[in-house]
Image: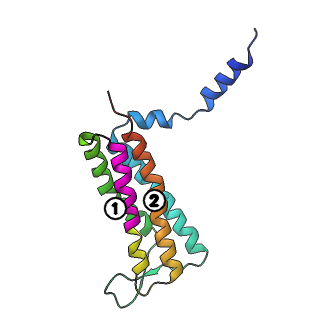
Amino acid sequence: MSVTVSQTQTAAQSVSTPHSTRSLATRPVWLVGVLATLAGAVVTEAFALVARAAGVPMDVAGPGQAEAAEIQVGGFAGGVLFWSIAGIVLAVALARWAERPARTFTVITVVLTALSLVGPALAPHTATSTQIVLAVSHVVAAAVIIPALALRLSHRRG
């Protein structure tokens, strides 16, 4: 039995090619949103744990607070889970009614992510290192969640 190089390469590519892109395209938008949110929450919490282990204080004060309070372990993941609900609802609505849902979703969510960086920058009684970690955590969560949902929204279901 003779196997050509191109047959071997094709077989290797089909085995090593992840099916995640195809799988995302066929799943309901809400499910892709939930899965992306869970992944984003885990990655963001891991980032925060690394920052915490590196000695970054996790004490933050909101507007009007006299002193900072500690962000508990799990707080970053909880924030991602809470705020992503709006993103999932937006994605579902755009999938149904927008002419170009992926582009519209990406533009809106990137703008909202940029606006979310204002909060950490203005957090009173908060160390600069903590402000940086907070801002980067917003970008980390967005970098996980937005592309997955945009990819799903770029594939119309037949």
> Label 1 neighbourhood size at 10 Å, few (<14), some (14-19), many (20+)?
few
| Residue range highlighted in magenta | 100-115
| 95 vs 125: above or below | above
Give the spatial CA distance, label 2 vs label 1: 10 Å
Tell me which numbered mark, 2 or 1, is placed earlier along the sequence.
Answer: 1
Q: Residue at x 40, y 53 (%)?
A: 37
Task: Write down the quadrant of residue 12 in the picture.
Answer: top right
Please tell me whether residue 124 is drawn above or below residue 143 in the rendered image: below
Q: Quadrant of the N terminus?
A: top right
Q: Is residue 6 left or right of residue 70?
A: right
The residue that appears at 34% across and 55% down in the rendered structure is 108
- Numbered disc 1: secondary structure: helix
Residue 116 — which label?
none
Secondary structure beneath dot 2 equals helix
In the rendered image, residue 99, in percent from the top left (x then y), is placed at 28, 40
Q: Quadrant of residue 114?
A: bottom left
Question: Which amino acid type is shown beneath numbered disc 1?
Answer: Trp
Tell me if 72 is positioned left or right of 16 in this view: left
Type of amino acid at the residue the image marks with label 2:
Ala
Q: List the residue tagged with mark 1.
A: 83
Q: Residue at x 47, y 53 (%)?
A: 144
Q: Nearer the viewer, residue 30 or 78?
A: 30
Give the class, few, some or many, for how many residues have Cα within 10 Å of label 2's Cα (few <14, many ≥20): many
Name of the residue lying farthest toward the top: 1
Instruction: Residue 135: give x, y in percent of width and height.
Output: 47, 70
Residue 141 got which mark?
2
Q: Quadrant of the C terminus?
A: top left
Q: Answer whether residue 93 is visible to the viewer in this image.
A: yes
Above/below status of 75 relative to 16: below
- Judged left or right of residue 105, residue 40 is right
